Amino acid sequence: MTRVETDLITGIAVDPVTEWFDDHIDALQRPLTFDLIAGGHSNLTYRVTDGSGRAWVLRRPPLHQVLATAHDMTREHTIVGALQGSLVPVPGVVGLCADELVNDRPFYVMDFVEGTVVRDGAHADALGSRVKLQASQAMVEVLAAIHAVDIDAVGLSDLGRRDDYVARQLRRWMRQFDESKTADRPEIRAVHDHLVERIPDQGPATIVHGDYRLDNCIIDGGGSIVAVLDWEICTLGDPLVDIAQLLVYWAEPDDAHLPLESPPTTSAGFWSRDQILAGYEAASGRAVDNMDFYISFASWKLACILEGVYSRYVHGAMGDKVPEGGIDSFVERIDGLVADAVARAGQIT
């Protein structure tokens, strides 16, 4: 087989990918249709539908500018597969294609989970108050479940080092920022150096999702979480980073800076950040200390991630999709996150 020329708009080589589906799914009815799912700024995610209406999800890396340690389909497939049957809701896994001759990059396929992804304020406004309250509670309970997974029992012992997590994350995202930045941002280096000198002692390691937020989950009609998505930067480490990251994403109506273009949690009816933090502490049984440090780190990390996303959009690596608010909206969000990281860092004694 010779290397395929993958469609630069969709990222799908239709004929070879269809053959792969035929080999892995019984009674497949051709033709397949591939629709790029709105939302998600890193790996490309498609809904794949066959002639009978059955649906699956295909995940593949961006088309260009794939950093050496990012967008590892084998890793993401392994994590979702390991969590099958656990208390963490994840989609069923169909399979992994590591042969780059099929679609230029590795990809994996999972079951399509029915439900709602609450991507923005408009989606959230359409939900009832009970659904918002249930979704708020479910977010902390599922995060506690992620952090309670027995790493060894599910076969994820080799997912990553367990110690020194925050120090490693600071090194990693500083490097990623340097490799993908579109402009110099001295505050990024300054916050990094400030945090490096003040890392709290880490408790026992857990699975760390790394990007846990409402719009990376699928909820049912009552607000329960039926699937957690986007495991691409999951590893082992300090669980307090996950709750801090959730708090950074969990925007409130009067926030000066917003991490997303239209955060769903600014819609009336969701828990406050204080309630989220208290709910997580109750559900996990874990003390949540040094939160100024962790929230400063989470804001800084998200700024580094968004700089990478912005760079990929600028260089055409995200296909033909344009994010809500336009590509340049990333600059304002990055500026706000850096400002929040600096402010929190100033409160760390």
Image (cartoon, rainbow, N blue to C red):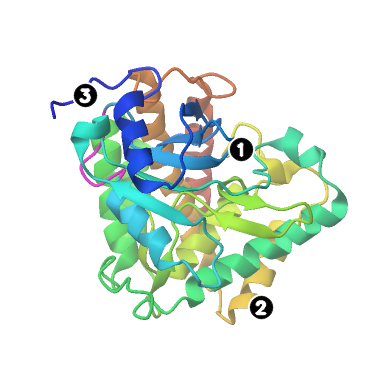
Which structural element holds mark 2? helix
Measuring from the top left, give residue 299's x and y in whole percent. 48, 48
Q: Which residue is mark 2?
A: 282
Q: Is residue 111 left or right of residue 207?
A: right
What amino acid is labelled 2 in the image? Ala
Residue labelled with disc 1: 257
| C-alpha separation, residue under disc 2 versus residue under disc 1 | 28 Å
Among the two numbered marks 3 and 1 on one chain, the one whose residue lies closer to the N terminus: 3
Q: Are marks 3 and 1 in contact (CB under 8 Å)?
A: no
SS for dot 1: loop
Question: Which segment is the magenta one?
Answer: 65-71
Asked if the magenta segment contains residue 22, the reply would be: no
Do the residues bearing badges 2 and 1 touch, measured as CB atoms within 8 Å? no
- Quarter of the image where the N terminus is located: top left
Q: In the rendered structure, which amino acid carries the disc numbered 1?
A: His
* Relative height, residue 345 to residue 141 (above, below): above
Residue 309 lies, in percent from the top left, at 40, 32
Label 2 Cα neighbours within 10 Å, binned few <14 / some 14-19 / many ≥20: some
Relative horizontal placement of residue 25, taking residue 192 as reference (left or right): right
Q: Nearer the observer, disc 2 or disc 1?
A: 2
Q: Nearer the viewer, residue 115 or 183?
A: 115
**Of marks 3 and 1, the one in the foreground:** 3
* Type of amino acid at the residue the image marks with label 3: Val
Q: Residues within 10 Å of mark 3 (few under 14, many from 20)?
A: some
Among the two numbered marks 2 and 1 on one chain, the one whose residue lies closer to the N terminus = 1
As drawn, the label of residue 4 is 3
Residue positioned most to the right: 129
**Contact check, label 2 and label 3, Cβ < 8 Å:** no
Tag in front: 2 or 3: 3
